[in-house]
Amino acid sequence: MIKSQIIILQQAQQYLESVTEEQYTEVIAPFFMSSAGAHMRHILDHYYSIINGLKEGLIDYDKRSRGGTIETKLTAAKGAISEISDFLNKLSNDDLQQTVKLSTEISVEDKNVAIVDTTVAREIIFAGSHTVHHLATIKHIAQMQDIEVDKGLGIAPATATFLRAG
């Protein structure tokens, strides 16, 4: 499981290697409301929510940085990916099976927060799936900028399996 997470993060890293900072921060309105950098920051915020949540005993995806250098500086995003990869590589099977509390807002009509039990493994799987989803959006942004990216960027694992069988 950790290896698959690292591969997903390597795809993000490869994207970062293929763009300029101007391309990374460009908002292509009206097609997109956010830059690729904003999507990358959002991706990495979720991993940091897990890292910080393990220290605090509560994972809270709603505590995000929203903005900052990861969103605007390629070197910051690359450094964050390296830091997150190091964290993931250090997790043991016991760490993955650890139960932890998860807090998340669940309503778009009013503030309604649910707190549930989960495991570290389940949340890392979620972060990977969430990452793939946002990498697909980043891929579309890059395509509109005429940037060539890996054809597998943003392809979900089950979709990749389906395509290999075809």
Image (tube, rainbow, N blue to C red):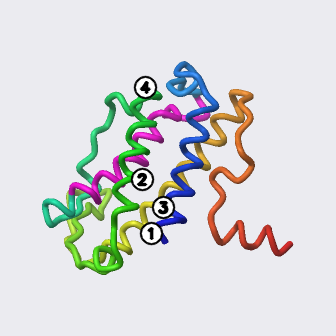
Determine which residue is flagged by label 3: 128
Q: Is residue 141 above or below residue 124?
A: above
> Which numbered dot is residue 125?
1
Q: CA distance from mark 1 to mark 4?
A: 27 Å
Looking at the image, which residue is at 59% across and 33% down?
17
| Horizontal arrangement in the rendering, residue 116 relative to residue 21 (left or right) | left
Q: CA distance from mark 3 to mark 1?
A: 5 Å
Q: At which x and y percent is residue 21?
A: 52, 22
SS of the residue under disc 2:
helix
* Of 55 and 83, the residue lying toward us: 83
| Horizontal arrangement in the rendering, residue 163 relative to residue 47 (left or right) | right
Q: CA distance from mark 2 to mark 1?
A: 14 Å
Main SS category, magenta section? helix
Determine which residue is flagged by label 4: 73
Residue ranking furthest to the right: 166
SS of the residue under disc 3:
helix
Q: Which residues are magenta?
A: 30-52
* Of 84 and 99, the residue lying toward us: 84
Of label 4 and label 3, which has the lower sequence position? 4
The amino acid sitting under disc 2 is Ser
Looking at the image, which residue is at 23% across and 57% down?
110
Of label 4 and label 2, which has the lower sequence position? 4
The amino acid sitting under disc 3 is Gly
> Which numbered dot is residue 85?
2
Q: Is residue 49 magenta?
A: yes
Q: CA distance from mark 4 to mark 3?
A: 22 Å
Q: At which x and y percent is residue 153?
A: 65, 50
User: Could you classify mark 3 by the number of other residues whose Cα lies within 10 Å: few (under 14), some (14-19), or many (20 or more)?
Assistant: many
- Please say if the residues under marks 4 and 2 sit with CB atoms less than 8 Å apart: no
